[in-house]
Image (cartoon, rainbow, N blue to C red):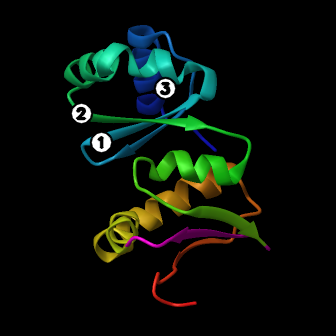
Amino acid sequence: MKLTIETINNINVFENLTGAKVKDCITEGSKLIFIVEEISLGKAIGKQGSNIKRASVVMKKEIQVVAYSDDVTKFVYNLIYPNKIDDIKLENGIVNIITKDNISKGKIFGRGRENLKRIEEIVKRYFSDVKEIKILWKNKSRK
């Protein structure tokens, strides 16, 4: 994983504003996604989201903060939060996200699978053994 000068500058600004330890920064159009250490998540967010709001104003971009975890399933859960899911399982390099809720499934997928592709791309940056991410829908009426 290589960091550009712009990425390093964004990380430095965010760390100085929040005091959080940043692991990575991903630029996605007008949005910045900061991957922070789990113990720094509270610092990164601040009281009632004050640090995120302040950083957003200073950097002039929308900001999303995600807690990093060495456990791939927990990291995927953190990436898709606040969407409701039933379970996440890692089997043979495939991460299966299991949901009964069609609305959450749609939000995780995104228009044209854009959200799922972004999640997969971020996960593969840290976990080279992950081949793909699938969303499995379990219909409540089936037995």
Specify which label sits upstream in the sequence, 3 or 2. Answer: 3
Q: Is residue 96 magenta?
A: yes
Q: Earlier in the sequence, mark 1 or mark 3?
A: 3
- Locate the C terminus and report the quarter of the image it occupies: bottom right
Magenta segment main secondary structure: strand
**Label 2 amino acid?**
Lys
Q: Circle 1 — which element? A: strand
Tell me: 49 left or right of 33.
left
Q: Which mark is residue 61?
A: 2
- Measured as percent of width and height from the top left, residue 115 is found at 39, 62
Q: The residue under label 3 is which amino acid type?
A: Ile
> Where residue 52 appears, x then y in whole percent?
32, 23
- The quarter of the picture where residue 60 lies is top left
* Residue marked by disc 3: 8
Q: Residue furthest bottom?
A: 142
Residue hosting label 1: 31
Residue at x-position 46% and y-position 87%: 141
- Residue in the picture at 41% in, 31% down: 6
- Local crowd at mark 3 within 10 Å, few (<14), some, or many (≥20)? few
| Spatial separation of the CA atoms under disc 1 and disc 2 | 5 Å
Q: Quadrant of the N terminus?
A: top right
Q: Which residues are magenta?
A: 92-101
**In the image, residue 16 above or below residue 125:** above
Single out the mark in the foreground, 1 or 3: 1
Q: Residue at x 53, y 59 (%)?
A: 121
Q: CA distance from mark 1 to mark 3?
A: 16 Å
- Asked if marks 1 and 2 touch (Cβ < 8 Å), the reply is yes
Indicate whether residue 78 is drawn in magenta. no
Of the residues shown, which amino acid type is indicated by label 1? Lys
